[in-house]
Image: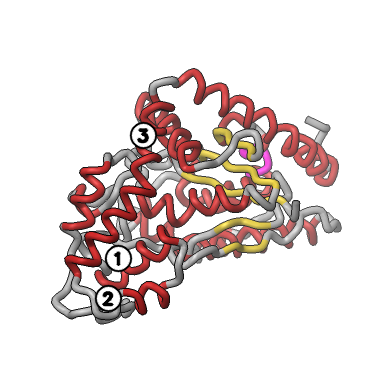
Amino acid sequence: MQGLIFSGIQPTHGIHLGNYLGALRNWVTLQESHRCIYCIVDQHALTTLQDAAQMRRNIHEVAAAILASGVDPKRSALFVQSSVAAHARLAWVLNCVTPMGWLNRMTQFKEKAGKHRENAPVGLFSYPVLMAADILVYRATHVPVGEDQKQHLELARDIAAIFNRKFESEFFPQPEPLILGEATRVMSLRDGTKKMSKSDTSDMSRINLTDDADAIAQKIRRAKSDAILGISFDRENRPEASNLLTIYAALAGSTRAEVEREYAEASFSDFKGRLADLAVEKLAPIAGEMRRLLADPGYLDSILEDGAAQARAVADPVLAQVHELVGFPRP
């Protein structure tokens, strides 16, 4: 086992192919070689989701998706963020050493708050500090990140460094990013220039992990394409072809170059047929397992409770050492 990996996912309804290829499938691979701590970050979700019943449903849906994708709770800790109080307690300490200017530079807050910054919740502004606490409370060495999270990991590294300087220690390590695979960014099936998203009004734009075999095949066959013969990767000039090629390569365990060579002279109808078969083969069993797991919420809760106990066993001693460093009584 090399190092400790932390990764989190928000409890959102409508977890889809982009989440699977960009995160969950990598989680399954990483547990083979690392100690892994995987977290459903409900405290982050609270900045936008303020409906208790929906939050509970989403937590179960995401937990089911993670387990159905192949994460083994006997090998990896899987839990809900709010079940481990050390996350929020460390976040306050880190808030007290993080300069406001660092948070003002975070582009994701500007994008999410838009023109209504004065009405945006404080939690949306400061959530990169909570994200840093999520990582540092386990003294994680590696964090799988997508392109849109790299800035927040850089901030976590900066926060670790400033804490160490202020309290004259080398307590927190510098977590390293892990960017895995070619399909870390999956685009919409209806517009290859936009990221696949649960918020898209068209359900045909995404493959949900709850979709059955017929729905998966239909969405692939109806995905937007172009009139050029042959499948090639060119994000600028052929965004839809590039997206479908990337999805195929990821599901097949091939490189984009290998898929390009295989389908250099194929029509889109032939390629989509092959991709539909491959997607059904890989994804339909996940949907079936999700349905089975969601029918037993007690089992899901027991997995999450066991994972929280494992997480607390790591996080609580770290928090105790932080208290010692800053002069607080031991928790």
- Residue tagged 3: 288
Q: CA distance from mark 1 to mark 3?
A: 24 Å
Residue 102 position (above or below residue 280) = below
The residue at the point 24 percent across, 80 percent down is 265
Q: Where's residue 303, x and y in %? A: 57, 27
Residue 192 position (above or below residue 44) = below
**What is the span of residues highlighted in magenta in the rendered image?**
87-91
> In the image, what residue type sits under mark 3?
Gly
Mark 3, Cα crowd under 10 Å, few <14 / some 14-19 / many 20+, is: some
Secondary structure beneath label 3? helix
**Labelled disc at residue 244:** 1
**Is 174 colored magenta in this rendering?**
no
Mark 2–mark 1 CB contact (< 8 Å): yes
The majority secondary structure of the magenta stretch comes to helix
Q: Nearer the viewer, residue 317 or 224?
A: 224
User: Seen in the image, is 62 located left or right of residue 31?
Assistant: left
User: Seen in the image, is 164 located left or right of residue 49?
Assistant: right
The residue at the point 29 percent across, 49 percent down is 207
The residue at the point 19 percent across, 69 percent down is 268
Q: How is the image coloured?
A: secondary structure
- Residue tagged 2: 231
Evaluate whether residue 119 shows in this view.
no
Q: Where's residue 246, x and y in %? A: 37, 67
> In the image, what residue type sits under mark 1?
Leu
Q: Where's residue 233, x and y in %? A: 33, 77
Query: If you read the primary sequence from the N terminus, does the residue marked by circle 1 or circle 3 appear first?
Result: 1
